[in-house]
Amino acid sequence: MAFHQAVHDLLREVSQKAILPHFQSLAAHQIEEKAADDFVTVADKLSEELLTEGFGKIIPGLPVVGEEAAFADPTVLERLSGPCWIVDPIDGTHNFAHGRQPFGIIVAMAEAGVAHTGWIYDPLSDRLCIAHRGKGAFINGEKIVARATGTEPPVAAISLIFVDPSRREAIREHIAPHYTLVDIPRCSAEQYPHLVLGQNDLSLVERTLAWDHAAGALFLNEAGGKAARHDGSAYRVDEWDKPGLICASSPRLWDEMAERLAALAA
């Protein structure tokens, strides 16, 4: 209990020191573009610095894989095959940089390529989602079970940002019509809670970086939904360059989407 309280305290402290003071008050020189439409801000960098320092005090010597550290030095990704922290200092930076919600902090702990604990923190509402492998998923201390929206057709947030153009058109033509489409939040810290809380039924993503999905995939699976690769294999944090992840609020909805994607590839 003391361990999880220490992590929660750190997330809240870093939010108050590094993130919230910069929300809707960033100057142009405090925002950089790492790649096309991929931003980093002074708040991201300070948040990761403080989180890395804080986790080093909670468990001395445990390596940290931070998004910004990995961008600066790709060899940091090699740590994902062993015991490590995985840190997204601000998930949803595109939103944050434009003064919009949602955004959050995502943290996971993994060993041998498999996440075993995850935290998804919303600085604005102080909502904390936690998952422990084999022990369930929790929001603000209350155990949660994933629920579908119950609507027909099911509600889907389909991210096509990193999809090959030809495949993008095929998804639009053959997959999208089976669902009620909603905008992607551009924030895994919001997308995964949406799938558990009955707001969305499905999410389809192409880029599956560990800091974006390690905690969320674990959270969804532990809540009784399903997050897995298109072939049904489990998501692993050390397969950072492997594309494709289906996330659903129930195994049935996951199966339906997987069948449609398989038919598309046939």
Image (cartoon, helix red, strand yellow):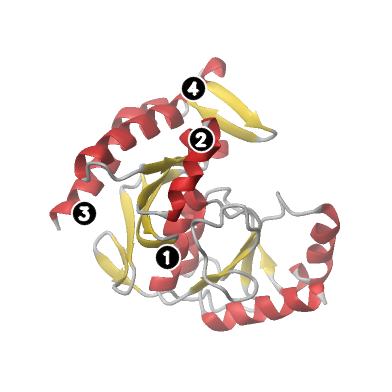
Q: What residue type is labelled 4?
A: Leu
> Disc 4 versus disc 1: distance between alpha carbons?
33 Å
Which of disc 2 and disc 1 is earlier in sequence?
2
Which of disc 2 and disc 3 is earlier in sequence?
3
Q: Estimate the x, y position of residue 127 in percent, counting from the top left.
A: 33, 52
89 on left or right of 236: left
**Comparing marks 1 and 2, which lies closer to the viewer?**
1
Which of disc 2 and disc 4 is earlier in sequence?
4
Q: Residue shown at 21%/54% (left/top)?
A: 4
Task: Tell me, yes or no, if residue 190 can be seen here.
Answer: yes
**Comparing marks 3 and 2, which lies closer to the viewer?**
3
Which image quadrant: the C terminus?
Answer: bottom right
Tell me the residue that label 2 is attached to: 96
Q: Do the residues labelled 4 and 2 touch (CB within 8 Å)?
A: no
218 on left or right of 184: left
Name the residue nearer the viewer: 183 or 238.
238
Q: What residue type is labelled 2?
A: Phe
Res. 4 mark: 3
Tell me the residue that label 1 is attached to: 218
> Disc 3 versus disc 4: distance between alpha carbons?
31 Å
Q: What residue type is labelled 3?
A: His
Q: What is the crowding at mark 1: few (fewer than 14 residues within 10 Å), some, or many (at least 20)? A: many
46 on left or right of 54: right
Q: Look at the numbered disc 1 and give the secondary structure of its residue.
A: helix
- Number of marks drawn: 4
> Disc 3 versus disc 2: distance between alpha carbons?
26 Å
Which of disc 1 and disc 4 is earlier in sequence?
4
Q: Estimate the x, y position of residue 251 in percent, counting from the top left.
A: 53, 81
Q: Are marks 1 and 2 in contact (CB under 8 Å)?
A: no
Tell me the residue that label 4 is attached to: 26
